[in-house]
Image (cartoon, rainbow, N blue to C red):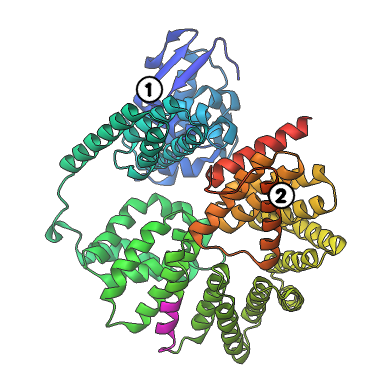
Amino acid sequence: MGVDRDVSIFAFGRFCVVSGGEEKTRAFTPRARRSLAHLAIREEPVERALLAAELWPDADQTSALGNLRRRLHDLERAFGRVGVTTPLALTRDRVGLTPAVRWSIDIARYAILSRDPTKADRAAALYREPVFPGIDDDVLELERRRLHGIQMELLTRLLDVEIGRGDAEAISAFAHAIVRLDPLSEQSVGKAVAALNGLGESDRARRLFERLTETMRHEIECEPEPPSVEDGMSVQTIAHVLQPFIERSAMLRGPDAARHFPDIERQMPEIRNALDVAIVRERDPQGGVRALAALSRFLFDRGHAVEAVRWYEAAIPKLSGDEVLRREAMYLLALLGRNLGKADHNLPAFEAAIAELRDGDDEPTLAKALLYAANAARMTGRVGLANQHAREALAILERLDDTYLVSFAHSALGAASYAGGDVTAAHAAFERARSGFSALGARDDETLMEINCARCSFASSDLEAARGGLTRAFQRAATSGNLYLQGHAAVGLSLVALDGGDPAAATRHAGRAARIASECADSELSVIALEAAAELFFALDEPARARDALAAADGVRSEYLIARAPTEQARCERLRGELVDRGLAVGTPVATPDVMMRSLLESVARYGRA
């Protein structure tokens, strides 16, 4: 960028522009600030038409685009007054800030740094509230809520790190910061109080507890009374908000649904209010559930699963008069639990849905519920039940002649056999599933079966077959951009490399798996990546870190009730024995999985430099 002097823009807290050591905030009018805000919260250039529609939602496109041209000219002039001559990256269709300008804005640096595990403390230190103060804007309000969530996550991670280190001053500082950000954050602060007491810092613990109690009391006292039912939306208003989604249900649940999600996200405050009134206040539970079903993929994809669980749990008891809708709601509630990875929303929820579906005539949904229940049973160690559900589903699907779901059923049978220690039967079932998916052109499913077949080869000590299958699977997953499959293949390749005596290759693969697991936030992938990390650390002569990784993996498995297959259990027990021989018993988890992921990445970087 053409910069005549150093420029820093502070968007957190009071908006401020400093150029060459002098404050130049007045160069940016309120209108220029709003344009700057919409560009600063994006990491890539944005389409002109989209930006114009956001800034002038009530104007026609021609007028909005004309307004945008004038506003961008005003913004360039504002930057010129503070010594920046080329602030914008402009093309015919898109507009964005130049990289150097982005880096001069604290909110943009925050977005970049918060994704880097090694820079979490730098990111957290930048955060202030509010973001772009004084601008009343729906898009910015969504961004404020999103950044609030990111900051809470960063502070919680940093608190966990300091608890692990036993730094009382830092524990207290991060806990007080969490209380300031969210006065109702009892769980995190409770951990900090316990840690401080454990370190003999009873005064710090007492002051922290008193601060938490005081702020919680203030929040509760200041919380407004909920509006009465009479003050809520009318049924007609609810329908106006939710009916368009119900009408587009097939599209929003289909393969191209994701392209509509950004538009839905912008409407989320209105949708949330309508669902609360329709379901929680009982104005229209049936309509609310139909809208939930239509929005199911969006809710899964965009992190609203916890809210959706609350709505479904509130609605299902009110649907006794509509059995078809009730069955679908119970099935979708179980699917939400599967996405959340929580045991209390997983197998019991699917079994409840199956009991309801048996009374209906929707056999395809019954079969899918049985398959998901088989997976949940397998993950929680109930292998016999997993086989039972998978075989019943297979019988239904073969009768219905659904080739895709038949292949899915074979994959569930393979997973159950593998979990039960029958590697030969598992390999045969996975191969049948792989062949079926391949014939249908279901590439990602075929790739997953290739990974599973390779795992069977690895369990049978055929390292060459395992390496070849995992390498092919990783390449296919990279081509399709499927991070979940890349992560699973990378874990397998790391273990193959370790057993093959190649710790350098194991380090590369484990680092890749850790990065992917951190991005995907998938509990099963996280736990196998941690176990691979434990073996890697031991091979690299870092037994203490191997112990910590294995303890963290144990913690994830305990929380989510994820059972180990016999071959995996044998490897972990062997590692436990070797750690005990070194005088290191594996006990209570000493770090969260996320902390261990960051730790692994740091090791990978260190060994790479060496």
The x and y percentages for residue 249 are 44, 70
Identify the element where label 2 is drawn. Answer: helix
* Residue count near mark 1 (Cα–Cα under 10 Å), binned few <14, some 14–19, many ≥20: some
Number of numbered labels in the structure image? 2
- Does the rendering let one see residue 73? no
Identify the element where label 1 is drawn. Answer: loop
The x and y percentages for residue 176 are 35, 30
In the image, residue 391 lies in the stretch drawn in magenta:
no
Q: Amino acid at mark 1?
A: Phe
In the image, residue 356 lies in the stretch drawn in magenta:
yes
Drawn side of residue 262 relative to residue 86, left or right: left
The residue most toward the top is: 21
Q: Nearer the viewer, residue 563 or 478?
A: 563
Drawn side of residue 35 relative to residue 386, left or right: left
**In the rendered image of this protein, does residue 187 appear above or below residue 421?**
above
Q: Which range of residues does the magenta coloring cover?
A: 351-360
Q: Nearer the viewer, residue 31 or 270?
A: 270
Of the image marks 2 and 1, the number of the one nearer the N terminus: 1
Q: Which residue is mark 2?
A: 578
Drawn side of residue 583 relative to residue 359, left or right: right
Q: Quadrant of residue 562?
A: bottom right
Drawn side of residue 516 relative to residue 453, left or right: left
Q: Amino acid at mark 2?
A: Glu
Residue 357, numbered circle:
none
**In the rendered image of this protein, does residue 58 appear above or below residue 210?**
below
The x and y percentages for residue 600 are 65, 40
The x and y percentages for residue 563 are 58, 65
Q: CA distance from mark 2 to mark 1?
A: 57 Å
Residue 15, numbered circle:
1
The residue most toward the right is: 464
